[in-house]
Image: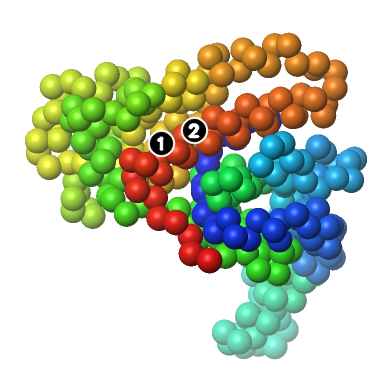
């Protein structure tokens, strides 16, 4: 269980007291099967798997939890095909064209007819709360999915003033400086991936992968006015990732230098293995967050 992406939300650590009752609060909004006429259902599930009852797992000052979902799969092509057949049959019977209102009503009736027979897709979205630094880390590169999880958490707790991560300095400017030769923060090294954009919203975009980034070719793009919008980085030879100007971390990977300590973990004990992996992951992400906070001047969440 290692996260592959990170979307972060900050919250004031003054709310940590309310998090002591997290397990009880999550139990009040557990995932329920999607209803026959519903398109989706959301609720919390155990991070240990569907057969487990516990809904959160704490190691140190970090608490792991999982948002579950059930979504009806109802392809629009299937709906439209059946609707068109029904429209044709009604028009032939009545000898006139159906108006827009009648067509919409027929489509709604068709969706309700198909919903009980639709396939259901289950989803799981892992996240954890770092109470020391006041952030929620969500294993997703989608801001919408992350916001949905925070919304569900806020619903469970009654109140949870979390906000998307924000920087007081321009991430583009900082990352462009790093690739231009400015000294990187301690522990950080350039990776082999970047994305360069013109200042114009419709300007050129250059994507580089598996390439040395401090080269004459990259330098020419910078001299033409392009700036770095995504940058591959390595932290302490333990974690590689791609940092975006939106402060979303993609392609998160834990390297051999970090995971070698897991070799001595009892692989037959699921709880012990989860503890070890979660402790390692949260410690590395703490370090990554601290580097970002210092060098990007991340805004704090107000109480």
Residue 182 x, y percent position in the rendering:
20, 30
In this picture, residue 88 sits left or right of residue 243: right
Q: Name the image quarter holding residue 124.
A: top right
Q: Which mark is residue 46?
A: none
Residue at 78 percent across and 57 percent down: it is 21
x, y percent for residue 57: 77, 41
What is the C-alpha distance between the residues marked 1 and 2? 6 Å
The residue closer to the viewer here, 146 or 161, is 161
Taking depth in this image into account, of 142 and 21 the one nearest to the observer is: 21
Q: Quadrant of residue 32?
A: bottom right
- Residue pictured at 35% horizontal, 48% vertical: 297
Q: Quadrant of the N terminus?
A: top right
Position above or below: 57 against 152? above
Q: Tag 1, which secondary structure?
A: helix
Q: Count residues near mark 2 (Cα–Cα under 10 Å), then give few for <14, some for 14-19, many for 20+.
A: some
Viewer can see residue 70: no
The residue shown at (65%, 56%) is 16
- Kindly state the secondary structure of the residue where label 2 is placed: helix
For label 2, the residue is 287
Instruction: Look at the picture and state if 154 lies above or below 139.
Output: below
Does residue 185 appear to the left or right of 218 in the view shown?
Answer: right
Instruction: Mark 1 and mark 2 in contact? Answer it, CB < 8 Å.
Output: yes
Whole-percent x, y for residue 149 in the image: 64, 56
Q: Which residue is denoted by mark 1 in the rendering?
A: 291
Q: Residue at x 22, y 53 (%)?
A: 202
Q: Is residue 172 visible?
A: yes
Q: Residues within 10 Å of mark 1 (few under 14, many from 20)?
A: some
Relative to 181, 157 lies left or right: right
């Amino acid at each position: 269980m290692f996260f592959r992406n990170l979307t972060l939300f900050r919250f004031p650590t003054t709310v940590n007291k309310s998090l002591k009752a997290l397990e009880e609060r999550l139990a009040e909004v557990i995932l329920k099967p999607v209803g026959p006429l519903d398109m989706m259902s959301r609720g919390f599930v155990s991070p240990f798997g569907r057969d487990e009852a516990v809904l959160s797992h704490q190691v140190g000052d970090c608490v792991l939890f999982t948002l579950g979902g059930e979504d009806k799969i109802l392809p629009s092509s299937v709906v439209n095909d059946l609707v068109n057949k029904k429209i044709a049959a009604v028009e032939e019977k009545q000898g006139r064209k159906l108006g827009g209102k009648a067509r919409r009503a027929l489509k709604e009736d068709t969706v309700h007819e198909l919903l009980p027979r639709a396939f259901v897709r289950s989803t799981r979205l892992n996240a954890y709360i770092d109470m020391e630094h006041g952030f929620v880390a969500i294993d997703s590169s989608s801001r919408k999915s992350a916001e949905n999880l925070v919304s569900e958490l806020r619903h469970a707790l009654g109140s949870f003033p979390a906000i998307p991560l924000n920087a007081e300095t321009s991430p583009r400017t900082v990352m462009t400086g790093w690739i231009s030769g400015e000294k990187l923060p301690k522990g950080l090294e350039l990776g082999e991936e970047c994305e360069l954009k013109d200042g114009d919203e419709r300007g050129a975009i250059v994507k580089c992968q598996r390439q040395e980034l401090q080269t004459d070719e990259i330098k020419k793009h910078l001299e033409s006015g392009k700036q770095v919008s995504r940058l591959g980085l390595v932290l302490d030879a333990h974690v590689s990732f791609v940092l975006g100007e939106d402060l979303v971390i993609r392609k998160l990977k834990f390297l051999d230098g970090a995971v070698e300590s897991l070799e001595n973990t009892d692989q037959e004990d699921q709880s012990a293995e989860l503890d070890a992996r979660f402790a390692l992951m949260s410690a590395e992400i703490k370090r990554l967050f601290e580097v970002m906070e210092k060098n990007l001047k991340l805004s704090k969440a107000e109480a």
